[in-house]
Image (cartoon, helix red, strand yellow):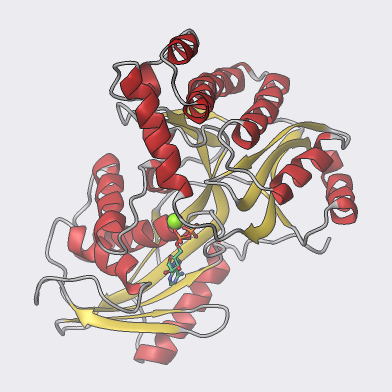
Amino acid sequence: MSNEVQPVGTARLLQLARDKYVATYGCEPVVAASAPGRVNLIGEHIDYCEGFVLPVTIPFETLIVGSYNETDKCNILSVLADEDAQTSFPSSSAESLKPGPPTWSNYVKGSIANFPDPVKGFDAVIVSDVPIGSGLSSSAALEVAVFTFLEALTGKSVDAIEKAQLCQKAEHDFPGVPCGIMDQYIVTMGKKNHALLIDCQSLEATQIPLELGEYVVLVTNSNVKHELTGSEYPQRRAQCQQAAEKLGLSSLRGAKREDLEELKRLNCDKLVIMRAKHVIEEIYRTTEVAKSLRRNDLERVGKLFFQSHESLSKLMEVSCSELDELVDIIRGAPGVLGARMTGGGFGGCVVTLVKRDEVDNLKSIVLKEYSGNPTFFICQTNDGARTHIL
Ligand code: ADP
Ligand code: MG
């Protein structure tokens, strides 16, 4: 069916990267590594409150091939849909790496600069089928793919948790994005047929078996991204922090439902109470989804998805008309157990738990009724970052 985005597949991506490498540098690459994108099943706008997130990997990945070039420069080419992007900069053993243009090179430089050993000059080609800037974490896929490539190139392997944290630091320091830990954790530690429950307070990660039987997770990309003022995210963070402080807590992780009454009694701002209600209930929902997945209670998972969406829309106010429209249409379709917006909001994707047999029907209903131009993919989970034999 049209509007379905199919993964290119690892073998084909490897071939594309290798051909481009030979054409560009005139020799064969020696090492190859890849890392997938991700989507969050539930646990939205609570990572910064030390809550939980429950992401899965998606069947799209970023792959890098390359070899040492016996110089003190790194030359990297990224094959993109419109035009290839090229960048060259000093290796980390030549001089210290600094952020600078082009913007995309900072995701690569960040991983090199945060790699525990100095890295000598290398040539590389990057290929990817992760949609860029769609909230599916092409950025973490790129950072972690590069880091994994460096492990293969240098022979130095880094513990998964440390690696994810170094890649997060790379995104903070180089492109300058103050992201949480979710993306790098799942992209590094993701496991086929599992979701990863991440405790954003202890940073502990637990693999949750994802046995969906006759159901699948369908991702519907609204293909809209509203450029708002940019203050929405810091504002939500600040409001949650304010609620925690009123309660004498360092974060809302420790807050209980009864604390909402206390916030009212303290004459707390109405919006702050709404945000706190979302956070307290979403933390509960996320742990409940993990438990329900373990018990194979998919109906409960679906109900919690719908509740999460409602809360993100009405209490956190981070949805938009397109996402609300999509969830409303999906709610009425046969075989659907639940649906919710995923990611930061104001556009991006919806995740739906739906019977595999009903997927085509659901897609045609959405295509008929939704006012926008959506694309779909079935979320087949895959292992996280890995190396490949060339
Ligand atoms: P998301 O992570 O949701 O896709 P971000 O804005 O966090 O969106 O990251 C997207 C940015 O990451 C791009 O603008 C680009 O700078 C960089 N990037 C991601 N993948 C690639 C790639 N394959 N080649 C070059 N740059 C990439
Ligand atoms: Mg990103």
Instruction: Judge left or right: residue 260 versus residue 176.
Output: right
Residue 356 visible in this rendered orientation of the protein: no
Task: Answer above or below: position of 360 versus 67.
Answer: above
Out of 311 and 64, give the one closest to the viewer. 311
**Where in the image, quadrant-wise, is ligand 1 located?**
bottom left
Instruction: Judge left or right: residue 302 versus residue 348.
Output: right
Residue 329 lies in what quarter of the image?
top right
Give the percent coordinates (x, y) of residue 290.
54, 23
Instruction: Judge left or right: residue 305 versus residue 247.
Output: right
Out of 252 and 332, give the one closest to the viewer. 252
Residue 28 lies in what quarter of the image?
bottom left
State the count of labels. Answer: 0
Q: Residue at x 14, y 82 (%)?
A: 72
Instruction: Judge left or right: residue 214 versus residue 267.
Output: right
Quarter holding the C terminus is bottom left
Q: Residue at x 52, y 18 (%)?
A: 284
Task: Answer above or below: position of 255 versus 176.
Answer: above
Task: Answer above or below: position of 373 versus 246.
Answer: below
Q: Residue at x 61, y 66 (%)?
A: 8
Residue 327 visible in this rendered orientation of the protein: yes
Quarter holding the N terminus is bottom right
Give the percent coordinates (x, y) of residue 179.
36, 49
Outermost residue toward the front in this view:
267
Give the percent coordinates (x, y) of residue 105.
33, 73
Give the percent coordinates (x, y) of residue 44.
52, 36
Residue 197 lies in what quarter of the image?
top left
Task: Answer above or below: position of 93 versus 301.
Answer: below
